[in-house]
Image (cartoon, helix red, strand yellow):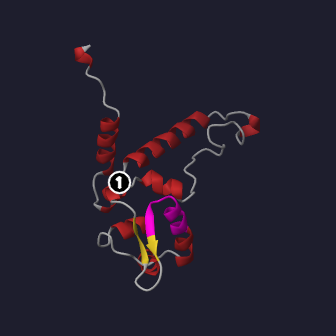
């Protein structure tokens, strides 16, 4: 929400975190920690002092949602296991639903990788935009020519 808030402001304008915190009803202390991570990941730029704040480091259409989630260090894992490993599963073995939840997690990550911040801010059809980007990234060869 905070990144969408900044993306929705005048392009290139510095946005104080206090303003974002107020509009989005998010703790400013939390936003400060989050934006430090986003800055280190190269997703935002900051300027200190009067008139300072944060702005996107590149156009919103060039920032995908998966990059934001990854930079925030928030887990996107759906299983209770560590990654696709067995550790942490039931009694040291893969549980019967492990592959189901691991596959779903990969699908979620793939979807978020194909959706940009610009898609969200401009209220585009996210499923359609993601499908188009995936198709462009992985074109299917014309089987009729084979």
Q: Quadrant of the C terminus?
A: top left
Residue 138 pos. (x, y %): 35, 33
Q: What residue would you read off at disc 1?
A: 62
Q: Tell which residue pokes out farthest to the bottom in this image.
A: 50
Regarding residue 1, the answer to whether it shows in the image is no
Mark 1 residue crowding within 10 angstroms, few (<14) / some (14–19) / many (20+) = some
Does the stretch in magenta take in 35? yes
Residue lying at 47% horizontally and 45% vertically, measured from the top left: 109
Residue 60 pos. (x, y %): 34, 59
Does the stretch in magenta take in 6? no
Q: Quadrant of the N terminus?
A: bottom left
> What number of labels is visible?
1
Q: Quadrant of residue 36?
A: bottom right
Stretch in magenta: 34-45
28 left or right of 90? left
Residue lying at 38% horizontally and 75% vertically, measured from the top left: 14
Residue lying at 43% horizontally and 86% vertically, measured from the top left: 50
Residue 28 pos. (x, y %): 52, 77
138 left or right of 44? left
Residue 56 pos. (x, y %): 39, 65
Q: Tell which residue pokes out farthest to the right in this image.
A: 91
Q: Secondary structure at mark 1?
A: helix
Regarding residue 137, the answer to whether it shows in the image is yes
Residue lying at 34% horizontally and 37% vertically, measured from the top left: 137
Which of the two residues, 41 or 90, is positioned nearer the viewer here?
Answer: 41
């Amino acid at each position: 929400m905070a990144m969408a808030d900044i993306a929705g402001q005048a392009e290139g304008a510095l946005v104080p975190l206090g303003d974002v915190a107020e509009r989005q009803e998010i703790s400013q202390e939390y936003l400060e920690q989050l934006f430090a991570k986003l800055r280190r990941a190269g997703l935002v730029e900051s300027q200190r002092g009067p008139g300072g704040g944060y702005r996107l480091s590149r156009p919103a259409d060039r920032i995908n949602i998966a990059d934001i989630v990854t930079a925030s260090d928030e887990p996107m894992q759906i299983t209770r296991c560590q990654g696709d490993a067995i550790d942490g599963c039931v009694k040291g073995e893969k549980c019967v639903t492990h592959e189901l939840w691991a596959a779903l997690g990969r699908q979620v990550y793939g979807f978020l990788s194909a959706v940009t911040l610009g898609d969200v801010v401009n209220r585009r059809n996210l499923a359609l935009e993601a499908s188009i980007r995936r198709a462009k990234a992985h074109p299917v060869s014309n089987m009729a020519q084979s």
